[in-house]
Amino acid sequence: MIGFYNYTVILTYIGLASAVTGIYFAMDGKPVVISVIALLISGLCDMFDGKIARTRQRTDAEKKFGIQIDSLCDLICFGLLPGAIGWAVGMREIYHYFILIFFTLAAVIRLAYFNVMEEERQKKTKDVRKTYEGLPVTSVALIMPLVYGFRKNIGNEVFSDVYAIVMLIVGIAFITRFKVKKPQMKTMLVFVGIGALEFLWLLYRYKFR
């Protein structure tokens, strides 16, 4: 079989499976909260897949494969799933379509740019990356569930526009040139804690409705 098969890609594939499940639920239109939880799970997997990958001595080909497979999965998890959720919550107006397309396009551009720059960086140094340029696509795994948590407060009729505005802002942030410090383990654990709180909050508020 073509490809590389070892434990370093397991979390990446689990995150992808979660995202695909979330997209299918979003296409069905209910319960949308499962799609939002799937986004949280994908974010959790993506947060630690790099850490696991670095525990193995990999060939250059395996490293390049890891970069590519991670970005392809990220596109589905964080470039398509948030849009599918947007569609499920009522983003059906013409201007919504443009925002949905822009969001995914911005994610594609960012991920492709990251791949090129990361490959160039690895030719010059073996050091671990310390900063990102632009908002990482993984950030939507915390941002969009938080926004969705207020759906009841905002009301279904208005919520699709609120969700669309957040998607537009996040999409712009994907491709805006600014530095973001790469989170260290303590910060990552804080993010995990925030994600866990969001998960419990969503379960309490929506109970799979």
Image (spheres, rainbow, N blue to C red):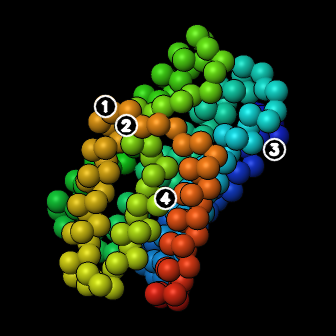
Pointer 3 or 4: first along the chain: 3
Mark 2 element type: loop
The three-letter code of the residue at mark 2 reads: Gly
Pointer 4 or 1: first along the chain: 4
> With respect to residue 74, does 158 lie above or below?
below
Q: Is residue 101 visible?
A: no
Q: Which residue is mark 1?
A: 177
Label 2 vs label 3, nearer the camera: 2
Instruction: Give me the C-alpha separation between circle 1 and circle 3.
Output: 34 Å
Q: Nearer the viewer, residue 34 or 21?
A: 34
At 56% from the left and 79% from the top, the residue drawn is 200
Q: Which residue is mark 4?
A: 141
Pointer 1 or 3: first along the chain: 3
The three-letter code of the residue at mark 3 reads: Tyr
Mark 3 element type: helix
Q: Which residue is mark 2?
A: 134
Instruction: Give me the C-alpha separation between circle 2 and circle 3.
Output: 29 Å
> With respect to residue 57, does 92 lie above or below?
below
Instruction: Give me the C-alpha separation between circle 2 and circle 1.
Output: 5 Å
Q: Which residue is mark 3?
A: 7
Q: Quadrant of residue 54?
A: top right
Q: Is there CB contact under 8 Å for labels 2 and 1?
A: yes
Q: Position of residue 79 (x, y in %)?
A: 43, 50
The three-letter code of the residue at mark 1 reads: Arg
